Amino acid sequence: MVGLAHFSLLAITAAGAAAQGLLSCGEAQYNYTEYTCFDDTTLCPVQSGIRTLDCNGACYDPNKYTCSNTTLETYSPYNGELFDCGVARYDPSKYVCYDGDMLCPKSGVTPTLPCGDDCYFASEYTCTDGVLSHYAGPNGSDGTVSVLGQSRFPSKHEYF
Ligand SMILES: *[C@@H]1O[C@H](CO)[C@@H](O)[C@H](O)[C@H]1NC(C)=O
Ligand SMILES: *[C@@H]1O[C@H](CO)[C@@H](O)[C@H](O)[C@H]1NC(C)=O
Ligand SMILES: *[C@@H]1O[C@H](CO)[C@@H](O)[C@H](O)[C@H]1NC(C)=O
């Protein structure tokens, strides 16, 4: 493996991941039911059914904390307190702020994840270089990949 060109190694890794239904995060492979990958570098675990999220390298429970400009702040769920996300204001009970300027909605305690300008459920899609594909399923069948090109949850608005 060491002697292979980088491109070939990536191709093999991707094929292997597809065969096993695993996703790649940098050099690592992971099961989306157990982890979420951020920026192709940081893996955050799903803990007790809660998908934790990255805040500047720290993994946090988005139902207890909000990531404000790379700093975690606690909040009381469903008390209506609003936080800043770029120019938007949001209720962290209902939305997650990513990278300080992008909002994605939550479904109950499940956060959707950012991909380019879209938000997605980890159980339904995968994100590669800012482009969504239908998740291929646990067996990694890759014959049915289709791509969404639509921005459904634009940021820079008020969300609460
Ligand atoms: C991912 O984890 C789930 C739940 O533990 C398991 O059912 C599934 O087989 C795993 N998938 C892979 C590819 O390991
Ligand atoms: C965010 O944090 C950085 C680094 O601490 C700081 O320079 C910047 O002013 C902060 N931005 C806001 C909007 O608070
Ligand atoms: C995945 O593979 C397992 C074992 O080969 C099989 O039992 C299962 O039906 C497959 N699931 C799908 C969705 O193809």
Image (spheres, rainbow, N blue to C red):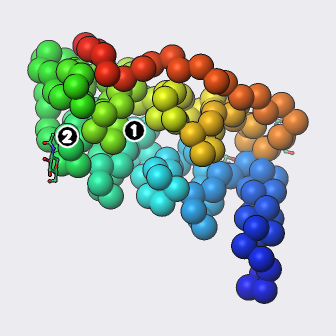
Is 141 drawn above or below residue 57 in the view shown?
Answer: above
Q: Is residue 119 left or right of residue 11?
A: left
Q: Is residue 114 found left or right of 11 in the rendered image?
A: left
> Do the residues bearing badges 2 and 1 touch, measured as CB atoms within 8 Å?
no
In the depicted structure, whether residue 157 falls above or below residue 40: above
Q: Rounded to the nearest whole Å, what is the CA distance between mark 2 and mark 1?
A: 20 Å
Instruction: Decide if residue 58 is in sight here.
Output: yes
Residue 55 position within the rendered picture, expressed as x and y whole percent measured from the top left: 30, 49
Q: Residue at x 76, y 67 (%)?
A: 7
Residue named by callout 1: 50
Is 157 left, or right, of 146 in this rendering? left
Question: Which mark lies nearer to you, 2 or 1?
Answer: 2
Q: Look at the image and tell me whether residue 16 can be seen.
A: no
Locate residue 78, reporting x and y percent: 19, 18
| Quadrant in the picture for the N terminus | bottom right
Q: Which mark is residue 68?
A: 2
Query: Disc 2 on helix, strand or loop?
Result: strand
In this view of the protein, which residue sits in the foreground, 146 or 109?
146
What element does badge 1 sit on? strand
Q: Which amino acid does label 1 sit on?
A: Ile
Q: Where is residue 46 in the image (x, y as percent from the top left)?
A: 44, 45
Q: Residue 91 carries which label?
A: none
Is the C-beta of the residue carrying label 2 under 8 Å from the nearest atom of ligand 2?
yes
Residue at point 87%, 36% (across, down): 143
